Structures are given as structure tokens and as C-alpha cells.
Amino acid sequence: MSLRTFLIAAAIVACAAAAAPASYAQTQTQVPQRPGNANLRPIPEGPGTRSAELQGLDKVTARTQRFYAPVGQTTRFGTLEIKVDDCLVNVPEAPPESVAYLTITDHKPGQAEEKLFAGWMFASTPSLSALDHGVYDVRVLSCTMAQGSTPPSSR
């Protein structure tokens, strides 16, 4: 191997190590960096619990389900475990938008858990940052102050 080939290979390995994501345990405790939109802010305080309103689709049964996932807590949808780390909305003067940082893990029975998604999902453009799963789709509908404990509605 020539010196030039060796140096290029060493540079590639160094860059890959620097760009490698943190371990799963570390990513669970990191606070997500907010999107670059200055109009986004947390939901104004009020009665209820800061929550993301999500819609899940079970592709096998073709059933959709709307449910609330409180910020900072974990919610189940099928075999998925969804944690909402943050939920932001646009200021009233800007066009309506809701953005949620979700971490989605699949817990199939008898198998090791699999982290499927970690990132910001936008209500206005769900395909921009979507969950890629063979059985389930999850999308953000809105960020809201959920009142009490309402059971998920099925359609």
C-alpha cells in the first residue's frame, strides 16, 4: 500500500469516527437541538399537559389511531414505543406549524429492541422526516395542551 493510499484511508477512518453517532444510551439523555426556525416556540402554558397529538397507521389492518403523547414521557402504539422529547409551535403571526422531536423504538416480542427513528417531525410536511417501517406509520398532527386522559380514537 502506498503512503498516499494509507493517508487517505486513515483520514476516512478518522472522519467516520468523528461523525459516528453517540451510543444509544447517550442519545436518550441528550436534549434535541431545535430546528433553525426562529418562529418556533414551546406551547404556551395553560391547563393540561404539553403533548404531541400523533396519528398512527397500522398498515396490516389499515386502521388509524389518534393519540396524545405527553412531552418527556413514553407512549405505546402497537409494538412501537414513542418518546416525545420536545414539541414546538409557530408564533401566532407565522403560518401554523407543529414540530415534535420523537424517538421511536420497536419492541417486537422475543427480539432485541430496535431504534427506528430519532429526529424532528413536522406536521405540515410529514414526508420530510418520516418513520420508515413495514407495519407502522406515525406522524405529528399538532402540539397541544392535552386535557385529562382521553382514550385513543380509532378510525
Image (cartoon, grey):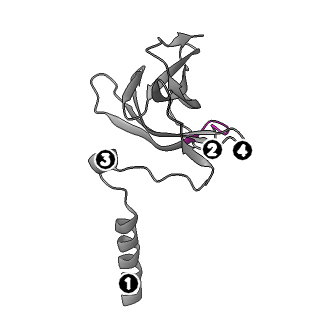
Q: Can residue 101 be seen in this view?
A: no
* Residue 128, numbered circle: 2
Labels in figure, total? 4
**Residue that appears at 31% across and 47% down:** 29
Q: Where is residue 53 in the image (x, y as percent from the top left)?
A: 54, 26
Q: Is residue 149 visible from the viewing direction of this image? A: yes
Mark 3 and mark 2 lie on one chain; the one further toward the N terminus is: 3
Foreground disc of the pair 3, 4: 4
Label 3 with label 4: CB-CB less than 8 Å: no
Residue 123 on the magenta segment: yes
Disc 3 target residue? 29
In the rendered image, which residue does mark 1 sit on? Answer: 7
- Tag 2: amino acid: Leu
**Residue type, mark 4 in image:** Glu
Which numbered disc, 1 or 2, marks the residue that appears first in the sequence? 1
Q: Which residue is drawn at 68% across and 40% down?
A: 92
Residue type beneath disc 1: Leu
Sequence-wise, which precedes: disc 3 or disc 4?
A: 3
Outermost residue, bottom side: 3
Between 102 and 136, the residue placed more toward the observer is 102
Point out residue 153 in the picture as x, y percentages from the top left corner: 54, 11
How far apart are the alpha carbons under marks 1 and 3? 36 Å
Check disc 3: other Cα within 10 Å, few if <14, some if 14-19, many if 20+.
few
Comparing labels 4 and 1, the label whose residue is closer to the camera: 4
Front disc: 1 or 2: 2
Q: Circle 2 — which element?
A: loop
| Badge 1 or badge 3: first in the primary sequence | 1
